[in-house]
Image (cartoon, rainbow, N blue to C red):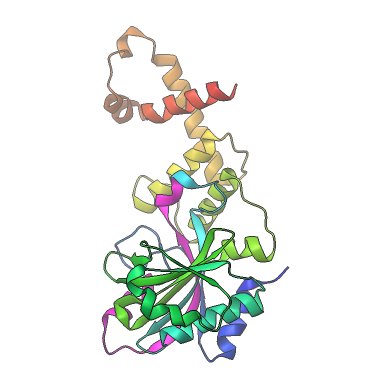
């Protein structure tokens, strides 16, 4: 198997570009619970017109908005983002050349087609003059983190987007390629199940120094552990086993009391505040168990 992380580090360093491995999902500011993208730590450098230079990294990320789509073969909660960031230093053409060389010559991935926003088609088409690759227009070739953004060009293999090059502020470079997606093509890594993805995500959150609680990151971790509980996971992690024991107790309490006259008119809020029972979660759990029988 090809070690893509090592290959990328060597590729960058051979070109004189410093590389860093950021393997925790802690955010770099208070705008998110977890780091959602490799560029988050560099926002101040993009926003400072006097900042220059180029740096590469592989950043561990979590995107909670993908939770409803995990298990489809392309979406993960936790993933590693291969990044290249340049602050008013690297021309867009050099960024394209950098990635076409890494993908096609180092990883032996033949890009099927790339996309460009119609507004940039005339200006950017020539970026690929030296490459045998199809170019398609795409109105969605824009990216923003809510503050910094710009037009982008995206790379596709087997109709799956494997990464993109963003041109934030018109004079910077922000590149992101999914390590897991590249691994799927380079090393033929099989698709992960929903349970595997949840376990990987919980493991990474724990390794980043968070533990189950009722607040912020800890609450999200507990929510993911409950999703594993719904799946009937046999994961042996101590925090999951504690949550499983807690949910078994909650479920037993709810089943014992719910049909008694004294409790039949109680609201979901009462159940949660008084008994610690999340009725919506329990009813969804019972429904899924019934559907699977």
* Quadrant of the frame with the N terminus: bottom right
Q: Residue 251 location, x and y as percent?
A: 46, 25
Horizontal and vertical percent position of residue 249: 48, 27
Left or right: where does residue 27 sit relative to residue 154?
Answer: left
Q: Nearer the viewer, residue 281 or 149?
A: 149
The verdict on residue 50 being magenta is: yes
Which residue is the extreme one toward the bottom? 16
Residue sitting farthest toward the right = 1
In the rendered image, the vertical position of residue 187 relative to residue 202, given as above or below = below
Residue 207 percent across, percent down from the top left: 52, 60
Corner quadrant of residue 25: bottom left
Q: So how many labels did they put on this image?
A: 0
Specify the quadrant of the image occupied by residue 266.
top left
Does residue 76 sit above or below 31 in this rendering?
above
Q: Is residue 277 visible?
A: no
Q: In this view, does 237 lie to the left or right of 59?
A: right
Q: Which residue is drawn at 52% across and 45% down?
A: 239
Residue beneath the point at 58% across and 44% down: 195
71 and 206: which is toward the camera? 71
Q: What residue range appears in magenta?
A: 39-67
Q: Position of residue 100 (x, y in %)?
A: 56, 78
- Point out the residue furthest to the top here: 261
Residue 245 to residue 83: above or below? above
Residue at image coords 62%, 44%? 236
Q: Nearer the viewer, residue 2 or 130?
A: 130
The answer, for residue 88, to whether it is visible in the render is yes
Residue 122 colored in magenta in the image: no
Check the image and report above or below for 171 versus 246.
below
Q: In which quarter of the image is residue 2?
A: bottom right
Residue plotted at (39% across, 90% down): 89
Image quadrant holding the C terminus, namely top right
């Amino acid at each position: 198997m090809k070690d893509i992380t090592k290959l990328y580090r060597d590729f960058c360093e051979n070109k004189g570009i410093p590389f860093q491995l950021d393997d925790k999902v802690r955010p770099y500011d208070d705008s998110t619970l977890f780091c959602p993208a490799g560029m988050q730590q560099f926002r101040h450098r993009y926003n400072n017109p006097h900042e220059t230079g180029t740096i590469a990294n592989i950043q561990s990320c979590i995107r909670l908005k993908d939770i409803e789509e995990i298990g489809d073969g392309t979406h993960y909660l936790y993933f590693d983002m291969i990044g290249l960031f340049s602050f008013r230093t690297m021309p867009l053409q050099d960024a394209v050349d950098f990635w076409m060389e890494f993908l096609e010559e180092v990883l032996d991935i033949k890009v099927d087609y790339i996309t460009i926003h119609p507004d940039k088609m005339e200006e950017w088409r020539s970026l690929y003059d030296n490459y045998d690759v199809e170019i398609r227009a795409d109105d969605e070739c824009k990216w923003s983190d809510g503050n910094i953004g710009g037009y982008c060009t995206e790379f596709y293999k087997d109709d799956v987007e494997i990464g993109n090059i963003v041109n934030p502020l018109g004079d910077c470079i922000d590149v992101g390629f999914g390590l897991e997606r590249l691994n799927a093509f380079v090393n033929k890594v099989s698709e992960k199940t929903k349970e595997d993805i949840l376990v990987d995500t919980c493991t990474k959150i724990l390794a980043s120094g968070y533990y189950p609680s009722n607040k912020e990151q800890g609450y999200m971790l507990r929510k993911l552990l409950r999703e594993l509980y719904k799946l009937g996971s046999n994961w042996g992690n101590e925090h999951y086993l504690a949550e499983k024991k807690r949910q078994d107790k909650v479920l037993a309490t709810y089943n014992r009391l719910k049909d008694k006259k004294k409790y039949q008119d109680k609201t979901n809020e009462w159940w949660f505040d008084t008994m610690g029972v999340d009725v919506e979660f329990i009813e969804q759990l019972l429904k899924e168990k019934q559907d699977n029988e």
